[in-house]
């Protein structure tokens, strides 16, 4: 879309999510990486020398040669993807947002009232908060965020159901991949032949219980009115590399049949302004008919890791319907989610 | 208790559960293995030559030398543990029950009205059905069963809560170990770096939704009046060797605080007639205070694999309480469950 | 290269290797799948209904609709890729070879004197055996084979070293992925948290000890004079999905320094007639400088699964050099190897 | 043996090896834990509060209540087991050895001439070095060490073969469990569905190539004359929890048949003074006849984790014999090895 590529910075480029951002930006049609930032330990050194690359193969040679810059020093770019840790994001992301459009994967500002929490297929209209954000904060740039890696797949499945039938209550149990904890993250002695039934001491569950309410809410008078949905989440860490699985039991305002729910899921399409974005999958939600799908290893790469897969849509003994949702936690759930947000900003004219 | 050891047969001795029965019966104070049965392919051959031993080490030498007998030929024993497949159990278990006390792990007759479904710590009184069973069927022996490998841990946790607060509704999500599928069972290509979100095409979920109602029911006039509890189960297979994890959200008639629930769980004791059984654990339920327990690899062997471990007892956003339950699926959930039932029969004077 | 696509059959299309062949042939520039064959159980049914797809996602829709044909019935195609089991290949492959150029992954005829055992980058000249094969057997088609899944990576590394320094002796220890055993193949209970130190009861080791001698041999007077190399192999099965690792200790006629060996490996190029084949990787061998590479998960997809990766080239206390070789066992080591052979036949004018 | 229990200290008690020492010392007939030491971060706090327990269950309650002491402060004990890191051991172990008999698992002093490197079944006579050690260093205590976790199993298999046939050369390839790296040790992202073909950047291989020469050497004039054996090792890290596998190819001075080698291995017995030690297994080496054993998960606990298991004894194409050796790396290969050494010291009268 842009006539020449937009220079982009990656904040916190050495971690697992930062690496995914670099991988996804290779040969990107709109963006090119112009700056990488890292912690004090890494500043001034070539990226390729210091990174502990956890993905396949190795970083692209031209990225490997780039010198890591301090995160505190705002680069001369139009856009930044932030893979900063939660605490580092507190001060650094607003600093960049004064001049740069920041798309953050950090949880720090997700629930802040004037910061849009965005899934482009779900609530692109929440970008309307940015006028208020810029006016109040005096920023030329802006700050938007993408949700938690489990929230995102769940909400992509809930969105068409909520629009059609009104989601009222959700029991969610998740089986989350180790890559969600970054690197070194989960010790192998903790997870081989094992399950860990908690993540971040309850913090992960709190995110799954609150972020969907903002994502499915309505913007009104410069703020989001949260959706009225009750959510209970129980999370586990499982020995899977990539791909978070969620088992959902859902109660609706108007109870659909499984067939009606499947039709709503299968027909779910992104708004027109989102469909053509380079990282947008052809179908945001893929409904699988097999009795034992979706599965992380076989379905996580659907839509190049940007689609959510849904299966086993069936009645529930207690609420209305049950289903299984699977999405790639470091692509759709982190780096790819932030990148799609950046593409939305670029195509919306917010970044130029 | 018995002055000399009671001869016991193992039906379906070559499978994974049969192997566990053999392992648990090594040096048993009351029982000694007198007969092993198997399918046509195995009859007439020494056990050690034909078995594909899936547990540690190897079968005991004296068992390895035993000649496998046809399952259709009732041996001259007082007790039989049945690890028969569901369909083989249909005809064979009643055949043995004419003369022998059969403790079955098969699901075939679990929900049959005159067949006790027993967890000794939970409902030993259901053995009262046996008078009726013997009278109606003209059996000198009898048939009792133990529940499904996931049901058993869940019900051990629910029992003290039900007694104290009245369980009304349960959402259960399970993460089940591969050994639950027997051998060869789950193909490694299906489960390494993967999750399979279904077992037995919904059949496993049906068991978890129905068996607890019988187990927590009351015997009245030679039948069980089932408990009035609504249960919704979602099951998954995970890359764990042994140990099924269940994530529970529970609604009660009288809502307890987490502390009250923990006290009820920790105080749960087997009835006096069960406490001294050789395979009964010191504590049926072990409450763990750590934020990330129970875990299959670290907690499955609690009470020599016969205790259920419970952790993360906490409020639920939608129902009353949430918690995590872990139990060893091939010991407490299968071979050990059947063996404890056999011990209960022996100590009750039903077998002599 | 061909003006219109060459119709191709896949023999034994339902197994794990047959599935990979289908996956690799999606959008192939030269070939299109015209027939799928399977065992009696599968004949006459749509492929998509009967296959237990073990790869990502699902078979392409147009392939899923194809009706499986009996392997005994030779289709009207120019080329066939055979993923038949060893024993089925005995009769069926010669039947097809009467009219069709058969590229087989089966071990059945690999060591048969008039059957070329081919790695295109290593010994394309062995196709010269085909004149003799066709003349002797009266075939209009032909039969060529690719080596064992571990042999292939090892020989790709040995070839440039043998040419430059003369390989004399090789100690090889392999760590082989579960996909090498097909589906259902290795039971998860046998391999989770475990190693199995044998494959095919010694048969796998025999292949690694003999096939390289033919591959590195010279064609002379319509037969292959085997290379004079002593090889000792010890194989293991490890809990890895794809990618066989080989630890080599090598003795040479002329001992190279590690640097000389690395140079020979890095400079290794396919003969000109092989370089442009659609499935030929840009570099047959990729030398990795990191101290802890190659690794199966990070390097198996190098060259789209068609490159062998070599690392840790260093002196040996007993022989001359040690190194680690990694290659993708179901792509380069099976389906992709057979496909590259088919491309070689097509580009050589042997198939038209 | 002692009339009352000997007080013992554990140096570096919080790491994975220290935890195993605590686990193995529960209910030990001779020893009781009197002191635990740890790093600055842990000093002064109750062990149970600070330890990240990586084994099953939890530390014994009486140990959990003990206050961790600084490693630099020598406790009033007769014996110490050291699980110190290599660098911490440099200064701390000699400090303790002035007054206390130290049995160290650290590699720091293993190859120091006056420090016995001991496997009780293999070379208990090397304790003769202690007279010299005490005289030269003026110590009332002493320092002895146990070998590397892979070395120990290999040497237990080599010892009877060396005595009978003279081992001349050994090619060793190892597949080592994750617990060998301690905790947190290997990141799960590095090892799930993966192999890492190096440990400690070559350091692990150097230990396997040198320690056996000292272990199989002869004490003469207050020093060890090393055995003349050429060893080449290639190591890998594999996704196995406990149990190191070694694939050996061995050349002998007098070539045995496989049957002769098996007989020598099966007949291997500890010297009389070692046989009765509490942690000594009934058989140091267990020969397995199955074609696919030993396997880590099924054989690591042989002899309560103190036996080495050997299988697949067969001819080698290049050297004389090949075989597979398996031993438990954190029991026999670390904590149990140190404990058995301590028992040897106690029974030898060196500690009282």
Image (spheres, coloured by chain):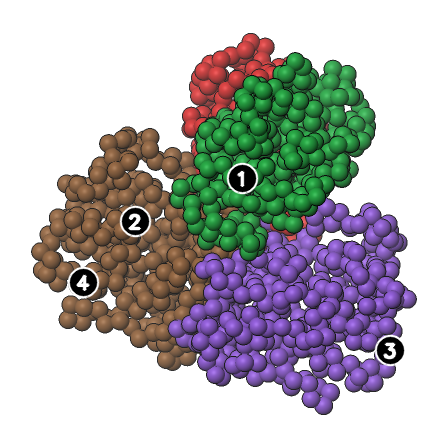
Chain colours: A red, B green, C brown, D purple
Return the residue nearer the eye: B29 or A101.
B29
Residue for point 45% across, 32% down? B88
Label 1 or label 4, whichever lies nearer to me, is: 1
| D97 relative to A289, above or below | below
Q: Secondary structure at mark 1?
A: loop
- The answer to whether mark 1 and mark 3 are in CB contact below 8 A is no
Q: Badge 2 is on which residue?
A: C85
Q: Chain of mark 3?
A: D
Per the image, the residue denoted by label 3 is D140
Residue at screen point 63% across, 42% down: B6
Q: CA distance from mark 2 to mark 4?
A: 21 Å
Q: Nearer the viewer, mark 3 or mark 4?
A: 3
Q: CA distance from mark 1 to mark 3?
A: 68 Å
**Do dots 3 and 2 share one subunit?**
no
Quarter assignment of residue D177:
bottom right
| Residue identifier under label 1 | B76
Residue B256, percent from left and from top: 79, 21
Who comes first in sequence, dot 2 or dot 4?
2
Q: Tag 4, which chain?
A: C
B1 or D81: which is nearer to us?
B1
Instruction: Determine whether the residue tagged by mark 4 lies in a helix, strand or loop.
Output: loop
**Tag 3 secondary structure:** loop
Mark 4 — residue?
Answer: C114
Q: Would residue D219 be found to the left or right of residue D290 on screen?
A: right
Residue farthest toward the top in the current orientation of the protein: A254
Mark 3 burial class by Cα count in 10 Å: few <14, some 14-19, many 20+:
some
Query: Element at badge 2?
Result: loop
Q: Residue at x 24, y 32 (%)?
A: C44
Circle 1 chain: B
Q: Which mark is residue B224?
A: none
């Amino acid at each position: 879309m842009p006539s020449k590529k937009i220079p982009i910075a990656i904040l916190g480029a050495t971690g697992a999510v930062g690496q995914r951002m670099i991988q996804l930006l290779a040969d990107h049609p709109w963006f090119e990486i112009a700056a990488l930032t890292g912690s004090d330990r890494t500043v001034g050194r070539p990226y390729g020398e210091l990174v502990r690359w956890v993905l396949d193969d190795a970083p692209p040679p031209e990225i490997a040669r780039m010198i890591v810059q301090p995160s505190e020093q705002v680069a001369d770019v139009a856009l930044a993807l932030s893979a900063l840790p939660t605490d580092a994001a507190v001060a650094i992301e607003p600093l960049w947002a004064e001049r740069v459009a920041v798309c953050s994967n950090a949880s720090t500002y997700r629930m802040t009232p004037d910061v849009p929490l965005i899934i482009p297929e779900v609530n692109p209209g929440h970008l309307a908060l940015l006028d208020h954000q810029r006016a109040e904060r005096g920023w030329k740039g802006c700050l938007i965020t993408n949700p938690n890696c489990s929230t995102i797949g769940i909400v992509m499945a809930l969105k068409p159901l909520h629009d059609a039938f009104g989601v009222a209550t959700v029991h969610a149990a998740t089986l989350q991949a180790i890559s969600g904890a970054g690197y070194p993250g989960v010790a192998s002695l903790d997870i081989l032949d094992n399950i860990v039934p908690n993540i971040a001491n309850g913090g992960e569950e709190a995110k799954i219980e609150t972020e969907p309410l903002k994502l499915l809410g309505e913007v009104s008078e410069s703020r989001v009115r949260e959706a009225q949905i009750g959510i209970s989440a129980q999370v586990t860490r499982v020995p899977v590399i990539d791909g978070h699985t969620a088992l959902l039991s859902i109660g609706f305002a108007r109870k659909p049949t499984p067939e009606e729910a499947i039709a709503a899921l299968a027909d779910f399409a992104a708004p027109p302004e989102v469909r053509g974005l380079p990282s947008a999958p052809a179908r945001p939600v893929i409904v699988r008919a097999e009795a034992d799908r979706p599965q992380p290893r076989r379905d996580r790469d659907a839509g190049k890791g940007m689609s959510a897969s849904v299966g086993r849509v069936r009645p529930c003994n207690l609420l209305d319907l049950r289903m299984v949702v699977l999405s790639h936690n470091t692509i759709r759930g982190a780096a790819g989610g932030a990148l799609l947000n950046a593409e939305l900003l670029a195509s919306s004219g917010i970044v130029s």
